[in-house]
Image (spheres, rainbow, N blue to C red):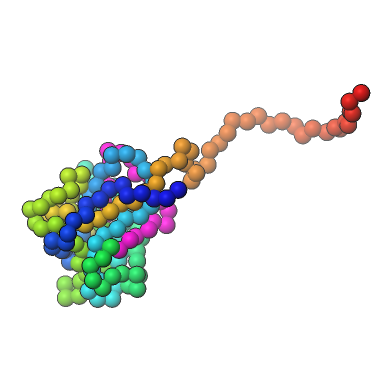
Amino acid sequence: MAATLREKNTFAHQDSNIIYSVARVAQTFTPVERYLLTSYKFYYNKVTDHALITALTLTDGSGNPTTELALTSIGTSGLPLEYAWAELVLATPVIVEAGTEYCIWLRTNRGGPSSPATVSRTAIGNDSYAAGTGKSSVNSGSTWTNISADFNFEVWGEDVPLVDYRIPVLQDFQWQPPVTGIQNNPPA
């Protein structure tokens, strides 16, 4: 089954936030339907060589990231040098539930304020994505601040199968002793 676009906030680039090893950005979203989240994209600009590390999390009720559901990364060779979409594919897709708030945060594996990467967002005050909030952290995610802007992102997923193929289903059965002494009785 092919993934389809499920959530998005796409617009002409207006501004950006820097990210590096301790400076993170995040975007929350709340699905309107249940689906299997397979990947997400951010409009991203690599300034120096580094990997991009991201996590899909639940939130604490205030929109701050909590329990990690998936962690993924892209090495430096897979990242754009100028603003372009960077896609992060989950090794194990995650079922997201309708009405539950989720968060995706991003950071790099190294660097500091003088060698950051940047993530495209709306201008401050242009909170264009009603189903979520843009956030930033300057202390490795210990605390988060709402930024009154949203990031340029897409979330992709598939319909959830009627039976989740990743969870074994136990069937009711009764043990029967093996049949012995089978006779071949041809019809008369």
Q: Which residues are magenta?
A: 86-104
**Can you see residue 16?**
yes
Magenta stretch prevailing secondary structure: strand
Q: Residue at x 86, y 32 (%)?
A: 181
Outermost residue, right side: 188
Quarter assignment of residue 112: bottom left
Residue at position x 39%, y 50% in the image: 3
In the displayed structure, 71 sits above or below 83; it is above
Residue 59: percent from left, percent from top: 25, 47
Q: Is residue 98 magenta?
A: yes
Residue 26 seen in the figure = no
Please give the name of the residue rendered at 88% of the width and 31% of the height, measured from the top-left corner.
Answer: 183
Q: Which residue sits furthest front?
A: 12
Queried whether the magenta region covers residue 108, the answer comes back as: no
The answer to whether residue 28 is above or below residue 81 is above
Residue 136 point in image, percent of width and height: 17, 58
56 relative to 9 in the view: left or right = right
